[in-house]
Image (cartoon, rainbow, N blue to C red):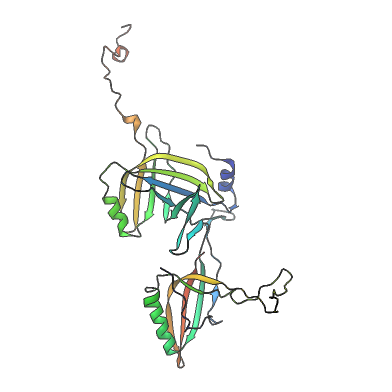
Amino acid sequence: MLVPLSVRNALLAQETEEVEIALVTITHAALAAPIRVSSDATVRLSTDPLRYGTLSNGLEYEFILMSALVPDDQKGAPPQTALVLDNVDARLVEVIQSFSSPPAEAMIEIVMASAPDFVIQRFRRLQIVRASFDESQVTLSLSREPYLSEPHGTRMTKQLCPGLHGIPNA
Amino acid sequence: MAYPRWPAELPQRSWQEGFSRTFGDSRLRSEMSTGPAKLRRRTTLAPTPVNMSFLLEWSQLARLERFWIEDTASGVSPFYIPDHIYDDVPMMTEGGVGVETDAGVPILIAADWLVRFTSAPTHEPLGIRWRVSFGIEVMP
């Protein structure tokens, strides 16, 4: 995973003024417009109603209480991550329970608050595969489609793959 | 929906006693097992906590109660209150000279805070009046 030098410097520094932000874009066929949320209150988007968020590439990402993990990189498994949102509104659970169609797609972008237009890392085509909740938190599990566990499509018969069956020089 | 203003019937400035303001703190401090801790910013914006106290008449206390229950919907809605640090302060040049209009009238700074209650107003009797104190946070 390639992390730019400026970001690495900020992560390792004794003190840093850099704020790492996770921008999440959730798209679904049933949504009229994508949901865009940010993990940081970078600017005041509007005063009335009072809204905070991040402006990145001309798009508004609403600030919500969120913790996001960088997608992992395990052998033989698609990258997985989880978004943990504070369950501040009962409607969140209603929305989560209402999904019956194909899973919503999510994209996570990591930016720095000092340069919100410059995307450091982008994780695309993540699908919301599982959503769990309790009275204080909503956890959305994101994963890519597990291409590695797809069936190959042909059967490994003796005729097709003799080497697999110990038949030499077939 | 416009946010309410601090009622004109109430004093527009807090008592000196009981007023305090703390800078907004958005830092994340990570303690190391030895040596100095590491510091970084957790978020960009942070509200500024302010404590205020007022000396109110009976009628003013009733007005405050209505402000709490109705205008701010039991203390959840943000509201405007005069900036207690910079409002009504003469504007100065770098050299500390007051800026004036052509007629020689000093130009004053007009500033408001957009705030929310962080603690509900506590009121205790003080003679025939009420001492009211509460905490607010100035929204960034």
> Residue reaching furthest right?
B95
x and y percentages locating residue A60 in the rendered image? 46, 52
Q: Which of B130 and A169 is in front in this view?
A: B130
Which quadrant would residue B60 be assigned to in this image? bottom left
**Vertical comparison of A5 with A43: above or below:** above
x and y percentages locating residue A116 in the rendered image? 53, 49
Kindly identify the residue that appears in the image at 56 percent across and 67 percent down.
B23
x and y percentages locating residue A73 in the rendered image? 43, 37
Kindly identify the residue that appears in the image at 59 percent across and 45 percent down.
A9
Say how many tags the image has: 0
Kindly identify the residue that appears in the image at 29 percent across and 9 percent down.
A167
Question: In the rendered view of the protein, which quadrant contains the N terminus of chain B?
Answer: bottom left
**Vertical comparison of A66 with A170: above or below:** below
Q: In the visual, does A66 lie left or right of A18?
A: left
> Residue reaching furthest top?
A169
x and y percentages locating residue B82 in the rendered image? 53, 75
Q: Which of A52 and B109 is in front in this view?
A: B109
Which quadrant would residue A72 be assigned to in this image? top left
Q: Nearer the viewer, residue B2 or A94?
A: B2
Q: In the visual, does A165 lie left or right of A126?
A: left
> Residue reaching furthest bottom?
B128
**Vertical comparison of A158 with B13: above or below:** above
Q: Nearer the viewer, residue B41 or B81?
A: B81
